Image (cartoon, rainbow, N blue to C red):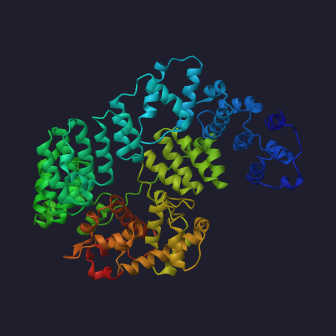
Amino acid sequence: MRTGLLLLALVSNTGMALPKKYEKMTVLERFEQAYRLAERPQSKTFVSLANSLENHPLYPYLVQKRLMSYPYLANESLIRSFLKRHEGSPLDWPLRKKWLSYLKKQKQSTLFNEFYRPSSDTSFHCFYLQNQLSDGASFDSIKEQVKSLWSVGKSQPKNCDSLFKRLFDEKYVTEDLIMQRVVKAADGGNHTLLPYLRTLLSEKKKYLVDLWYRTRRSPASLAKTKSFKKGHPELEKPIILYGLKRLIWRDADSAISLWQKYQALFDFSPVERSAMDETLALRLSVNGHPAAKNWFEKIPHKDITGNLLQWYVSDTIRRNDWAGLIAFVEKRNQFEHEPLYVKYWYGMSLQQQKKTRQATKVLSDVAQQRHYYGFLASQFLSTPLQLVDQPLQPTAVELGGIEGYVSAQRAYALFKLEMHTEARREWQHLLSNLSKAEQEVAAVLAHNWGWHEQAISTFVKAGYYNDVKRRFPLAYKSLLVSSANSANIDPAWAFAIARKESAFSADARSSAGARGLMQLLPSTAEYISRQKITAGSLYRPSSNVKYGTRYLKYLLGKMGGNPVLATAAYNAGWRNVKKWAPSENKVRFDQWVETIPFKETRNYVKSVIAYHQIYDMMLDTSDKQRIFTELPELFIHRSDFGLGNI
């Protein structure tokens, strides 16, 4: 009970005097001190600091941290009160998770089920279901949930085992359900589950698991066609289709040959045939295979959409089939609804076919867009680039209205404290309760705070794209300009990279471990600097930008001074760029960009080039159309840039 008493003192304000050394501190400085002391059970200083902050928006974070440090039964009433007050807010789940973990460990089933809320934690879910059974619920009432938990492509927590045993005992695990799990484990899941799942099947179906396992390990094993046709064609066909879709990346010709053989052996449905035809067309095009055109011709024009459409266009321009692209677009008869890249390449195809008047009309419309393709079209037509800058002008009352939300106040305070995760959660919680018009005002507010990453993402969430100067802020201007100049690269390029990589978030970290404004790997920074670099130092803007601009200069040298190749290399690595650069005929830069096989890199390069142009126009440069004036004269060829010697 001692811990409970300490917490009770915190939330009821004991009137303890604030030590004099803290009186001159700012409110946020006092919060930082209190937050550090929250885990100390006997800290009178914490209690006095917390009481001095009782009316501050961040006060609940002190209570939360205190409760998370002591999630015991003695504090149940305090935890209950806190979670009830803050349910559904960012303050809820961190404490609820800690409390549920404690209740589960203590086998407090009644309390656990009272506080449980659906989440991605499977262990919690299983404990919740077990408790329902203990309270008298019938297994039939939860069987569908248990089946869903069991039939996944990975192992589940051990505390789910008793539920799964009951599932088997009640005869709810059918061979159909087992095969569903086999497919999930083999296709993208944990294939080490397959031997176990094999033991659950009848002798006549065990071979299916063997086929899945073998095909997962080696798609080329599909060449052994005699392994199939053993009595379950509807269960064998998914294995074949899965294997062929993987094989096409490794050996396109073998995949085509095997697809033709298996079509003679199995009665694939029209949907299955169409899906495989589309997959072959897509992946052959990505690989630059000459047979891609043949497979595209099997697909009705109206069904060529999304990724497939992108690669159809890429394939036609790779082959310089300008007449073919014109015919394709015109047969679709939906030009107004075509993506911008289709319109641009249709216009360029018309120009290649000497249909200048039609080309000019099409490209003039494209040139009205603030976009990579709009800038390309403007350059081709020698017309001014269109920024379409229409800044929002919210009133002081509108801005004050957003600032009045407690989530906004907490987000701002947490942002200033560099408690980035908590700040983002509060901001997203705020946005979830705002209308689109209010989100636009919130984006301006975040910009005014200097919270550029959230301003940029909030404009996107609100669907407002024409506040250009706020969406492309000159954040860290002196640092980026001076570092770029020291590295002898264009400052606008450095801005474009930082904007694309992190949206100027100094604490950004990728799943691959890249860090900071320009998303550098520690190994890259060490290679560039020739010294040991700590990962944490890359969160300091000064260090990150210094090494990032040097790395851009290094890549520019590797790519023979070609900024397009260097930009691609920054995203995908120079070895991939080396593979993608044509070794035969030179290719115009825009054609080459359109055929980059990695979707992420292709879109990355387009974005950075467009951002480069925008920042070039926003910075104090002498030639405001320099980027898209120079680039069209740029041709890509491996030997021209010394890639063979990299």
What x and y, as percent, mark residue 455?
A: 51, 53
Q: Is residue 368 above or below residue 555?
A: above
Name which residue lies at 24% across and 40% down: 236
Q: Residue furthest front?
A: 203
Q: Position of residue 45 (x, y in %)?
A: 85, 48
Residue 541 horizontal/vertical position (percent): 58, 67
Which residue is painted at 44% across and 22% down in the image? 170
Q: Is residue 404 visible?
A: no
- Image quadrant assignment for residue 588: bottom left
Q: Quadrant of residue 98?
A: top right
Indicate left or right for 366 with 527 as reference. left
| Residue 546 vertical position relative to residue 35 in the rendered view, above or below | below
Q: Give whichever of 79, 365 is nearer the camera.
A: 79
Compare residues 199 and 350 and report the one nearer the observer: 199
Q: Is residue 408 left or right of residue 335?
A: right
Instruction: Tell me which residue sits at (46%, 41%) in the image.
Output: 436
Q: How many marks?
A: 0
Residue 621: x %, y % from top left: 43, 75
Q: Quadrant of the C terminus?
A: bottom left
Compare residues 154 and 284 and report the one nearer the observer: 154
Q: Is residue 633 visible?
A: yes
Position of residue 128 in the picture relative to residue 566 (left or right): right
In the picture, the quarter occupied by the N terminus is top right
